[in-house]
Image (spheres, helix red, strand yellow):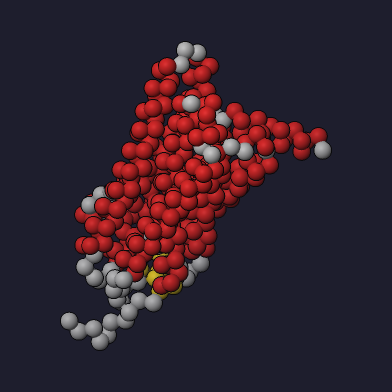
Amino acid sequence: IQLKNVTKVTKFTLLGFTDDFELQVYLFLLLFAIYVFTLLGNLGLVLLVTADAQLHNPMYYFLCMLSILDACYSSVVAPKMLVNFLTDSKAISFIGCATQMLLFVTFGTTESFLLAAMAYDRYVAIYNPLLYSINMSPRVYVPLITASYVGGIVHGTLHTVATFSLSFWASNEIRHVFCDIPPLLALSCSDTHINQLLLFYFVDSIKVFTILILLISYGFILLAILRMHTPEGRQKVFSTCGSHLTGVAVYHGAILFTYMRPSSSYALDHDMIVSVFYTTVIPMLNPIIHSLRNKDVKEAMKKVFERNWFV
């Protein structure tokens, strides 16, 4: 094979959704609003938990970490995507693309582990509430949070190194709005069979592991509900767990659809829409999902508003 006139890629071009400038402006306005609400909602929830002493328990520490992750997760993708909507140059450097992928996969994987840890926390709180502060002490929840981050970093590093060890020659146009794994594998001129296997089996293993923890935790929670004799107790459990289950279902559903399929079934344009959904819309919805049905959070918000109103 003659490679004399072939240039090694030093930067990539993110093609995005469309070349229609008017449509890009509308998309910019929509996604900018979503991004602003994402930051306000998630960082506002962190400040609320920090400021209210009644929310200083492990369940809300986990919720704080989820909010921080969502803000970071969205910030890895949204700023560059928004800039590209309004500029002709949609380039991203080789190092910038690798960094974006590393952070994106790291935060996404960490969130998967953290959602599983939150399910275990819900089980501990409901199954034996009197011993909750002992069974979920800092010696328990700090290692759970740390392990979630370590797992995310390892998984992100693995896929980033594997992807950017491939050869990229001549073509540098990525059919996506950010540097995700499937479109980069489609762009590479190397044999990506091993990368496809890594993507499928590692994501598969992580999802099976985290979903198994979710099922076991909620299985025990269901047993606890069946033993309750008062409607008030059951209502409190549904209020505590319903929001978490909703967030888990939406998040894992989008991830499973995008990554846990053989390479032959990838449709990059369709996956791009799903990817934008779980990197922008879900992080915006999470603080809403976890706040609206939570009595303690609503009470804390009410106190903040009343305090500011009468000051």
Q: Residue furthest bottom?
A: 4
| Residue at x 47% of width, y 12% of height | 229
Q: Which residue is rendered at x = 25% and y = 49% of the image?
A: 261
The quadrant the N terminus occupies is bottom left
Dividing the picture into quadrants, the one containing residue 55 is top right
Residue 19 lies in quadrant:
bottom left
Q: Residue furthest left?
A: 1
Farthest residue, direction right = 311
Residue furthest top as drawn: 229
In the image, residue 113 lies at what x, y percent? 41, 46
Q: Quadrant of the C terminus?
A: top right
Residue 135 appears left or right of 298: left
One can see residue 289 in this view: no
User: For the image shown, how many numbered marks are present on the structure?
Assistant: 0
| In this rendering, position of residue 175 left or right of residue 69 | left
Q: Is residue 298 left or right of residue 248?
A: right
In this view, the residue in front, 153 or 176, is 153
In this picture, is 150 found above or below 140?
below
- Is 61 drawn above or below residue 165 in the view shown? above
Q: Is residue 7 visible?
A: yes
Closest to the observer: 276 or 45?
Answer: 45
Up the image or down, 65 lies above or below 222; here it is below
Please report the residue visible at 37 percent of the width from the left and 57 percent of the height from the top. Answer: 155
> x, y percentage for residue 160?
36, 64
Q: Position of residue 49 (x, y in %)?
A: 63, 41
Residue 14 is situated, as x and y percent measured from the top left of the image, at 41, 65
Q: Which residue occupies 27% across, 58% down?
A: 198
State left or right for residue 56 relative to residue 254: right
